[in-house]
Amino acid sequence: MEPIESTSYLAKPGLKLETYPTLETFDKSDKYLKKKLEDVREDLGNFQNMLWAHRKYSVLICLQGMDTSGKDSLIREVFKDFNANGVEVHSFKVPSDLERSHDYIWRHYLALPPRGKFGVFNRTHYENVLVTRVHPEYILGEDIPGIDHLDKIDDAFWDSRFEQINNFEKHLAQNGTLIFKFYLHLSKEEQRQRLLRRLRLEHKNWKFSPKDLKERKLWDQYLECYEEAIGRTTHSHAPWYVIPADNKKAARVIVASILLGELTKYKDIRPPELDSEIRENIELYRKQLEEEKE
């Protein structure tokens, strides 16, 4: 298998998602892809240990995609070899009353990873230019001054919101957060098959909601919103990657490989230098422990 080049999946401003593939298998078996992921995620886990020792950067991973695109299973499989203390996962659902009493980015600030850790946002601040774009009536529930009618939610409103998101991410990047944004690009037919699987398999029934079918009817509208959101917010300090998601195992390998490849470019991330006293006496300390009697 050829090395995965992150640039192959980089989103471009003004992108059209119909030109991006939804399926990638690398002509490899599921067994091969599973083993490939195991190798990459072990290296990622080792990198996280070094990130923790270095403690000058944090890593924020944003996952977006249509329902059933595989976000949950990707998180489970890609970060399986991490120290449990080294990664924090946040799944953002419908805002609570407390969250609605603040601005829409507030709850995301609270969930940001500290230096030395990975943070994963399963759905993100981008819901506020995706779901709310398709359902603008949700904006009225934010109680924004001057926004008291749907007519007030115009192009200027969305321009302002994109600017706010760009400023938010620029601020994070300037203060040591390494940002990776992944859109899991699923085909409509594959979503249909995955929804059917949830209905056919009893142990998967709990994952199904009739709302999934209502939102599926808005597929094209969501795609247009994704295209604009990705195109207007992909930057070198906070890039978007479009990941073919019809094959879950391949998607996991791609995401893990992009993370490892890009993170290891930061040559300043390395274990801190030992204190001079420890370095000079390390053999003495080792000898003391080896000679210690029970």
Image: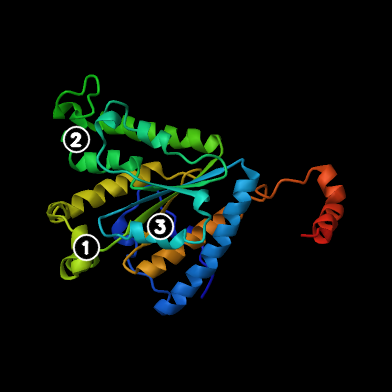
What colouring style does the render use? rainbow
Q: In the rendered structure, which amino acid carries the disc numbered 1? A: Lys
Foreground: disc 3 or disc 1? 3
Q: Position of residue 181 (x, y in %)?
A: 42, 49
Q: Earlier in the sequence, mark 3 or mark 1?
A: 3
Q: State how far apart marks 3 and 2 are (Cα).
A: 28 Å
For marks 3 and 2, give the one nearer the viewer.
3
Residue 166: x %, y % from top left: 41, 36
> Is residue 13 shown left or right of residue 131?
right
Instruction: Give residue 138's mark.
Output: 2
Q: Decide: few, some or many residues near mark 1? Use Cα within 10 Å; few <14, some 14-19, many ≥20.
A: some
Q: Residue furthest front?
A: 294
Q: Report whether residue 163 is seen.
A: no
Query: What residue is disc 3 on?
Result: 75
> Which residue in the structure is indicated by mark 1?
188
Q: How much space separates mark 3 and mark 1, taking CA atoms?
A: 22 Å
**In front: mark 1 or mark 2?**
2
Nearer-the-camera pick, 27 or 172: 172
What element does badge 2 sit on?
A: helix
Q: Are marks 3 and 2 in contact (CB under 8 Å)?
A: no
In depth, the one of 237 and 92 nearer the eye is 92
Is the residue 117 above or below the residue 190 in the image? above
Residue type of the residue flagged with mark 3: Ile
